[in-house]
Amino acid sequence: MKPIRLTKHAQSYFEKRGFSEDEVIKAIQESEWMTGDSGKLECRLNLDYKSDWNKKYYDIKQIRPIFVEEDEEIVVITVYTYFFRSN
């Protein structure tokens, strides 16, 4: 697989959206890619979370990177995270 690079924009959301670079890389490497808006690519990966986020407990964290595949690398433009309870 090509190297994966997060833009400064994507990196600026690490703390605010609650994801890590390793989680993004795992999502891209292990999940099915889909065509998103404007021809960009996206994928989704559910992770066991079982922790608090913004003072609420969640069982699952979903990572959704938005990226483009270039000749030499995969460039992550932004990343969304979603938190779910299993009940």
Image (cartoon, rainbow, N blue to C red):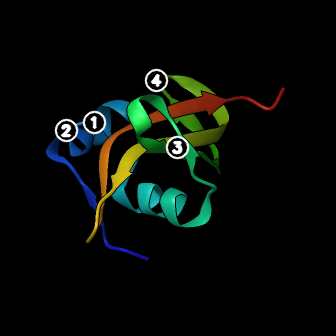
Q: Are there few (<14), some (14-19), or many (20+) residues within 10 Å of tag 1?
A: some
First in sequence, mark 1 or 3: give its number.
1
Mark 3 lies on a secondary structure that is strand
Q: CA distance from mark 3 to mark 4?
A: 17 Å
Residue 73 falls left or right of residue 18: left
Q: Which mark is residue 54?
A: 4
Q: CA distance from mark 4 to mark 1?
A: 15 Å
Q: Residue at x 43, y 54 (%)?
A: 24
Type of the residue with mark 2: His
- Tell me the residue that label 3 is attached to: 63
Q: CA distance from mark 1 to mark 2?
A: 7 Å
- Tell me the residue that label 1 is attached to: 13
Q: CA distance from mark 1 to mark 3?
A: 12 Å
Type of the residue with mark 3: Ile
Residue 50 falls left or right of residue 82: right
First in sequence, mark 2 or 3: give its number.
2
Q: Are marks 4 and 2 in contact (CB under 8 Å)?
A: no
User: For this rendering, which residue is in front, 20 or 41?
Assistant: 41
